[in-house]
Amino acid sequence: MSQYLIGQSPRLSGEVSISTSKNAVLPILAAALLTHEEIIIHQVPNLTDTCHMAEILKVCGAEVSFCQGDMRIRALSIGSPKENSLLRTMRASVLVLGPLAARTGECELSMPGGCAIGQRPIDLHLKGLQKLGAKVELDGGIARVSGGLKGANIYLDFPSVGATENLIMAAALAKGVTRIENAAKEPEITDLCHFLTAMGARIAGAGTNNIIIEGVEHLHGAEYTPIPDRIEAGTLACAAALTDGSVLLSGARSDHMRALLFKLSEAGVICQEDEKGLRLRGKARHPMEARTLSYPGFPTDMQAPLMVVATQTHGLSVFLETIFENRFMHVVELKRLGAQIRVEGQLALIHGGKMLTGASVTATDLRAAAALLLAGLVAQGETRVSDPDGHLVRGYESLEEKLRALGAHAQKLPDIQ
Ligand code: UD1
């Protein structure tokens, strides 16, 4: 079990560099299955999720090596992944469905289970593949997709990030033109489109909710560096805003973080973009309202970290979670530290301005884990964050080290067996 010890910290100051986006890298790695030529991805963050995705590519038959941030993938002869527990436990494993169906004409995959934050079905992925002409069968937790793919008009009932990515990848090798309407437009999807274009795909409308893909016969090898992680940058921005900090997040793309930066600015933090990245100064003092939405709305992945900031402002903040049905699990843990928060369904009312006091808390999901580390920075005394399922290292490259580099009292304790 991982454990972190966080002490009440001084104002954070200094510079820290932002890692490459986990959520951009995962679909890009899956897309490497679309060609038999070599793919090289630079600056791949060393996270459990990226290593697990590399394992999944290997069980699909690809050769994968990972050295000094460069991941090299060669998918010469591939097929449905052999049974592996990662397929059921790692949600993003579903992203190999589209590439495998497109390249080999068939794919059989254990359906990823739900997870703590919600049920997370894959009906939109499967419905879209059916529209592309695939036969889809569900049997005992296994999804079987077979048949050649043909371009089609697809309307997504909800702009799902994963379904949009899967269908773009499938359509890249389908015969004819595919139009995806009500597509998601997160920056990670635009990045995937840029990568696919570097492989020879023909895609128009990336970054809008109407994406058009003209299928090609073959895709070729490519080298690519994905975008910086807007959620890691946002988490560190919240840490600065909590501690009245003065921080430079080098490499951060503020154009991908508008919704969060509006919230922090309204709360009184000075957010400035320059050629090196994003500078933050000052403390969040005013309460805020945040409603999670698809991009460019406020990201659900930032809800827990921003809620910690809200606990330290003066007045009532209101948060509405509309993307996942069970994403307030951090609230119980924040209350252990003394936060005053009431949850009514998908609504959380945060009575800010209460001093937090260190205690032992447990991480229930990835972003909840990050939020608890942030809360520890302002809680009196020491906060011990237990992370029995290793959530934090799934998505953050040494968050505690980055916080420490900015002056925080944060350390990882030896793992408990
Ligand atoms: C991605 C991100 C995750 C982020 C989420 C929302 C990755 C690896 N993960 O997850 O960090 O929190 O976007 O921004 O990029 N849904 C269905 N049917 C489907 C697919 C989704 O009902 O077939 C629902 C989900 O249950 C959820 C909502 O749609 O309630 C959003 O899910 P989706 O956008 O697909 O998120 P992910 O791609 O799983």
Image (spheres, rainbow, N blue to C red):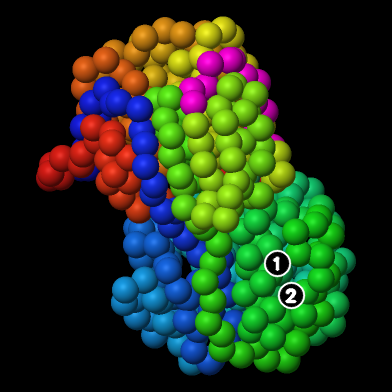
Going by the numbered disc 2, the residue's amino acid type is: Ala
- Image point (32%, 40%), residue name: 406
User: For residue 292, what is the image quadrant?
Assistant: top right
User: Which quadrant of the figure contains the C terminus?
Assistant: top left
Report the residue at 39% width, 85% height from top. Answer: 63
The correct choice, above or below, for 340 with respect to 153 in the image is above
Q: Nearer the viewer, residue 310 or 299?
A: 310
User: Is disc 2 in contact with disc 1, using a CB cutoff of under 8 Å?
Assistant: yes
Mark 2: which secondary structure?
A: helix
Q: What is the number of the mark on residue 171?
A: 2
Residue 369, labelled with which disc?
none
Give the labeled residue for mark 1: 167
Amino acid at pointer 1: Leu
- Residue 337 at what x, y percent from top left? 33, 15
Marks 2 and 1, how far apart at CA: 6 Å
Viewer-closest of 80 and 62: 62
Residue 157 point in image, percent of width and height: 79, 48
On the rendered structure, is 203 left or right of 278? Answer: right
Residue range highlighted in magenta:
282-294
